[in-house]
Each structure stands twice: as structure tokens, then as C-alpha cells.
Amino acid sequence: MTMIQCISPVNGEVYAERPAMAIDAARAEIARARKAQKAWARRPLEERVQLVLKGVARLNEMAVEVVPEIAWQMGRPVRYGGEFRGFNERSNYVASIAADSLKPYVVEESASFERRIEREPHGIVFVIAPWNYPYMTAINTIAPALMAGNVVVIKHASQTLLVGERMVRAFVEAGMPDDVFINLFLDHDTTSALIAENNFNFINFTGSVAGGRAIERAAAGTFNGLGLELGGKDPGYVMEDANLDAAVDTLMDGAFFNSGQCCCGIERVYVHESLFDAFVEKSVAFVKAYKLGNPLEQDTTLGPMANKRFAATVRAQVSEALAKGAKGLIDPSLFPADDGGAYLAPQILVNVDHSMTVMREESFGPVVGIMKVKSDAEALELMNDSPYGLTASLWTSDPERAARIGREIETGTIFMNRADYLDPALCWTGCKETGKGGSLSVLGFQNLTRPKSYHLKKAL
């Protein structure tokens, strides 16, 4: 029997393990969910919405267990209290727009005809969730999918092995039928086989580009919808009229919070030459204030990376950059907890350029490169010099300038004077190797349903 294990970054030991489900057992669970879907979809929308919100509330009641569990599984410090703020905000927002998002679009309602387009659930939505924000990223799809009348099957990353199990437990305890939202422990081969067999009607995956390609290959020929949020290398651009202190605080927090393991974390910053020296000086002071250590201790502000192999990737990128002439501004000795494994000191790099991997490929760790630029044109060229496109953060006092530059950036979201935030009222989407599809907002509901047209000619 294959065991799926979570190796804790806190101490390098097995924190949790579960047996990987055999494919026949998985098929049976999926069949059970499919059988329940039609009845679930026939329930009134408001009833489905309220059951989801009750599940969200029940999970909040488990905070005393959830918060240290996250720290043990992927290393986020307990001082930050879990993911409940974003988890609740997203759930509540999609609940507030569900009725309007799913209502029919009426073309004609006359004595002769009724013509309208309705939104119909896909059926079974398969959520393959990531470890970096294991609750928030999952709820982006789970909440609107269930509200829309789909049933949901979740498979969580091995690094956050217990999250899917806990989410389902919370929702079922809150009154959700146990065949409408189910958790499966699956290895990669079984996951791919189940997708290829057309067991699901829509698949949402958040993870690596390689993982997204594997999902696409498995789904080939099934004609099922895919939502893929993959890699990122999100830039910040600080213009000469920016609020310097606000830019430093937000961009450095965006680069280093969660040990840099954020989907839309800031991984590279371009600063106008007039502000460059001051921006770098303030950024160094900001980063030196972090305390790297055990995430279960309240004074820790920077925990370990989720796995030592992720930290090894960041170390390799930094080493390559230094060998090519970059300069590291943070002395690693200031962070004695750096053990050469999962615990990794933060780093700011200057004298960087785009020949360096750290400026073009995803780092997903506590490192950021800062480059000096002379103009918007130069910054724009550098921001677009990436295979990814999730968000870009622009710092200026001029909204028209930000919008003008934003239209030229190949990305899914443009921020002005903000970074590393997911607004549930706006579609969360990307381009290039960041993936395809979109979650949240009214468009998220559209992606989790299909249009069905009614052309009803009344008897004469």
C-alpha cells in the first residue's frame, strides 16, 4: 500500500500520512458524489449558499486546531493566525453575488416566446489544491462550485495532507450532505487516470507549470473544462512619483510574507533611478527586522519554506546570480536559524539582470531582485520579459499613467499602490504560462457552470 506523507518543515519528520486510495475505491466515491449531484442542484440556491456559509463558519470554530496544523504542515508562523480573513472574505463575497451571477439572462418574454439563457452546473468539479495557502486557494473554487449546484471532489497536496480532510469534516458537521463534498487521498498516477477516464466535468488545478501540463495531457480528449493557475514571477514597478515608504512596506511584505511562497508574491522590483538608492536602503532595513525560526513560536515572523527541496531551488538561484555579478545585501549570519535545509534566510539582490534565473524563473521563496530603470518604457520591457503573467504592482500617484502602462503589461491583474492581494470581486486569472481560466467574481461562477439556452414557442 502506498502511503502519502507530509514531511513537516518544522523538524523534517513525518507529521501525517494517509494511504493512497486504490483506483476502484476512488471510482466508487466519485460515483457516489455523481449520484448525489442532481438532487443537490435541485435544492434552492439560497439553501446551498447557506450550507456553504455554515461550513465556513464551522471551520472558523476549528481555528485552535487549524492554525498550528498549518504551521506543522507547511511552515507558516502561528502569529499570523491562519487564513481565515481571506477565506471568509472570499466565501462571503461569492455568496453575496450568487443569485445575480446565476440568474437567467432573459432575451424575450412575450405572448409568443420565452427565450433565455440559464446557467447549469457542470456536475462534478475536481479541485486539486496547493499547499501554500491551502484553505484560501481551495475555497476560491469550492464555495462557488457548491453554490452553483456542482458536487466537489478535493485532492490536496501531500504537503498539506490534512486540509482537504478537515474542510470536508467542517462542512459535513455544519450540515452539508457527505456525498456532495468529498476528499480523496490520491497519488499522481491515480489522479491522472481518473481524469483521463472522464470521471470529472471540470478540473481546477493550482500548482506548477509542469503539473498543469500533466493535467492537460490527462484531460486530452475528454473535452472537460480546465482552470489552471500555474507559475508566477510578479513584478513591482516604483515610479519617480511613488510614495516611497508605502512602496517599500508593501512590496517587501509581498516578497517575503509566507517565506515568499505566495502565488502573487513580488519576485522582482524595478525602481526609477531617482528613488533607487533610498528604496534599496529602506528595503534592507525592512527585511533585517524579520525573525526566522520555529513557526510555532509567537515571535517568529519568517518560518521555514514548506520543504527543503524548495529552499534548495532558491539557494541555487541566489548562488547563480552571485556568480554572475549580483550583490546580496542581507548577511545570512543575521539569521542563525538558517540550517541549509528548509529554514532559509531572506535575501535582497541588486546588480541583477535578466540573464539570471532569479529574475526570470519562479523562485517562490524569500528572495527578491531589485533593478534600476530610467523610464516607463524600460520598466515595461522588463516586466514583460517573463514566461508568466499573474499580477503586476505599479507605484505612482497618477492613476491614468498606471492604467496606460497596465494595458501594455502581459498579466492577469494590475495593482496600483497595492500588491499581493486577491480581490474576490475581480476575476483571478492569468496569461502565458501562468495558465488559463479564472476564479471568483461573476466570471468565476460562469466558469463553474455552462450556458443552457431555452427557446420556448408558446401555443397559438
Image: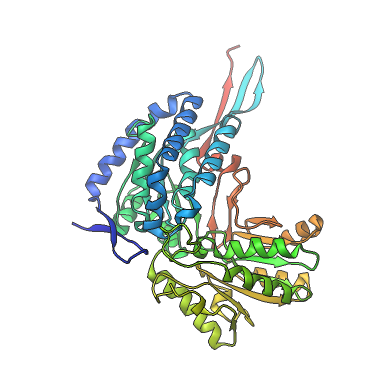
**Residue 248 point in image, percent of width and height:** 67, 65
Q: Nearer the viewer, residue 47 or 259?
A: 259
Residue 236 seen from this side: yes
Residue 199 in view of the camera: no
Q: Position of residue 329 (x, y in %)?
A: 60, 79
**Count of all numbered marks drawn on residues in the image:** 0
Q: Nearer the viewer, residue 213 or 55?
A: 55
Side of 264 relative to 147 (left or right): right
* The one of 20 and 131 positioned closer to us in this rendering: 131
Looking at the rendered image, the quarter that the N terminus falls into is: bottom left
Horizontally, is 83 left or right of 348 in the view?
left
Question: In the picture shown, does residue 304 fall above or below 56?
Answer: below
Image spot of residue 410 (x, y percent): 65, 62
Q: Is residue 143 left or right of residue 15?
A: right
Residue furthest left in the image: 1
Occupied quadrant, residue 402? bottom right
**Quadrant that contains the C terminus:** top right
Q: Which quarter of the picture shows residue 405? A: bottom right
Q: Residue at x 38, y 70 (%)?
A: 308
Whether residue 207 is situated above or below residue 459 in the rendered picture: below
Please, which residue is most extreme toward the top here?
460
Is the residue 238 above or below the residue 420 in the image? below
In depth, the one of 95 and 32 nearer the eye is 95
Colour pattern: rainbow
Identify the residue at image location x=81%, y=56%. Answer: 400
Q: Which residue is at a point 36% across and 51% down the rendered structure image?
A: 195
Q: Position of residue 342 (x, y in %)?
A: 40, 70
The answer to whether 345 is drawn above or below residue 194 in the figure is below
